[in-house]
Image: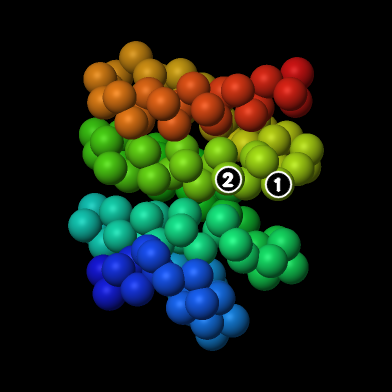
Amino acid sequence: CERLSLLARNDQRLQIEIIMGGGVMVLHQIMTGDFNMNEPVQEKASEALNTLLSIADERIISEFPIVETTTLMMMNFPESPVIQENCMAILKNLARRGQHYKVNVANSGGIDICLAMLRKFSSRTLKKEAHELLNELSAYF
């Protein structure tokens, strides 16, 4: 998972190859499978998924319950600022894709989790992600 995260980071051509090779599916399986409570693995999986989501085709993304998986991960790791930051970025990227994702994030508890993270952590990056996510979701209301 760490190698996938490193590979996906900077090379868009490689990102496309990873996506076309089933990378989103693999990362989703890691997030929901046997390693779903392994914090270091989930940190890398959420980072890699966030990177790939920025360019992944909607047809690929819509095959998986990414919003629900992401909010569940946030609830499973409430003390991990890295996972919280990565997950808020995932939700923000999805919310930017359209109204149905905004509704899904809101209905999956994304707003409450985001507000809780704003109160809990002092990380500027995390607060920035939280504010950007809330801004994206405000168009829903």
- Is residue 35 visible to the viewer in this orientation of the structure? no
> Which amino acid, by three-letter code, is at mark 1?
Arg
- Residue at point 37% right, 64% down? 9
Residue 98 in the image: state x and y as whole percent. 75, 43
10 Å crowding of disc 2: few (<14), some (14-19), many (20+): many
118 w.r.t. 97: above or below: above
Nearest the viewer among 47 and 75 is: 47
- Residue at point 35% right, 30% down? 126
- Residue at point 37% right, 55% down? 47
Task: Give the SS element for disc 2.
Answer: helix
Q: Quadrant of the N terminus?
A: bottom left
- Is residue 66 visible to the viewer in this orientation of the structure? yes
> Which amino acid, by three-letter code, is at mark 2?
Asn
- Residue at point 47% right, 54% down? 50
7 w.r.t. 115: above or below: below
Where is mark 2, residue-wise? 93
| Label number found at residue 97 | 1
11 w.r.t. 139: above or below: below
Residue 40 in the image: state x and y as whole percent. 21, 57
Residue 37 in the image: state x and y as whole percent. 29, 55
Callout 1 touching callout 2 (CB < 8 Å)? yes
